[in-house]
Image: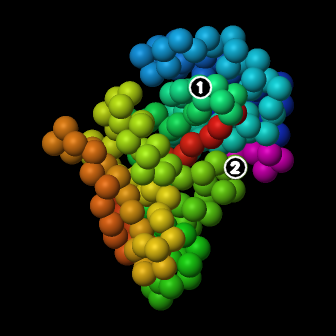
């Protein structure tokens, strides 16, 4: 996908290019979504242009979004960033705006929560992060900020996840911290 679109709308060519990218990823990783048919996913996406724009942003920033489940009760497909490592276009960010404002010097360019919101997506919860790790091994060299419970955030902390030693770890850090190897992953329900 080319540069960022500020209109939050894709033209016909961008839509077609994105749908083809998503289809190829979907077909190349069938183990992530057994029993789900691409034609159903595509029909849903084509009827929801705002969701397509969000997926384009997830793709543009290196997330490689893919379907990992279908929730029949909610009638929704769940897309999650499936890049092997935390998306390269979303690293070196502190957790949220409050954390960004609290830094007196060496401020990062932004925050994970704000960027996810601008993209129209949400940070993964610990539950969704663990669900992602069931379909592959992700963040073996990086880590990803996770949606932090309010009680932890109120005390100045934030949580992140990674995969080391054949185990999913959920750890903590000060919300104002940022690292070149820490980004965030998004979830999008369509």
Q: Is residue 71 above or below residue 91?
A: above
Quadrant of the drawing holding the C terminus: top right
Q: Is residue 182 above or below residue 175?
A: above
Which residue is at the front of the view, 25 or 3?
25
Residue 20 position, x and y percent, is 65, 17
Residue 33 position, x and y percent, is 50, 19
Local packing at callout 2 (Cα closer than 10 Å; few below 14, some 14-19, many 20+) is: some
Q: Is residue 125 above or below residue 189?
A: below
Quadrant of the drawing holding the N terminus: top right
Which mark is drawn over residue 120?
A: 2
Locate residue 4 relative to residue 12 in the image: left or right.
Answer: left
Residue reaching furthest to the bottom: 104
Residue numbers of the magenta segment: 3-8
Principal SS element in the magenta part?
loop
Q: Quadrant of residue 12?
A: top right
Looking at the image, which residue is at 38% across and 27% down? 135
Which residue is at the front of the view, 93 or 49?
49
Q: Which residue is mark 1?
A: 70
Q: Earlier in the sequence, mark 1 or mark 2?
A: 1
- Residue at mark 1 to residue at mark 2: CA–CA distance: 20 Å
Instruction: Give the total of numbered labels.
Output: 2
Q: Element at badge 2?
A: loop
């Amino acid at each position: 996908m080319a540069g960022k679109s500020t209109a939050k709308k894709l033209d016909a060519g961008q839509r077609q290019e994105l749908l083809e990218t998503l289809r190829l990823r979907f077909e190349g990783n069938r183990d992530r979504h057994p029993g789900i048919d691409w034609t159903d996913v595509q029909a849903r996406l084509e009827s929801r242009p705002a969701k397509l724009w969000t997926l384009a942003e997830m793709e543009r920033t290196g997330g490689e979004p893919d379907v990992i489940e279908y929730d029949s009760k909610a009638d929704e497909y769940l897309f999650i960033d499936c890049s092997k490592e935390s998306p390269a276009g979303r690293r070196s960010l502190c957790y949220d705006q409050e954390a960004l404002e609290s830094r007196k010097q060496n401020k990062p360019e932004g925050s994970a929560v704000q960027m996810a919101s601008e993209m129209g997506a949400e940070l993964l919860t610990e539950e969704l992060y663990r669900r992602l790790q069931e379909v592959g091994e992700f963040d073996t060299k990086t880590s990803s900020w996770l949606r932090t419970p309010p009680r932890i955030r109120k005390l100045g902390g934030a949580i992140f996840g990674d995969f080391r030693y054949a185990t999913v770890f959920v750890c903590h850090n000060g919300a104002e911290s940022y690292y070149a190897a820490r980004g965030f992953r998004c979830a999008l329900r369509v």
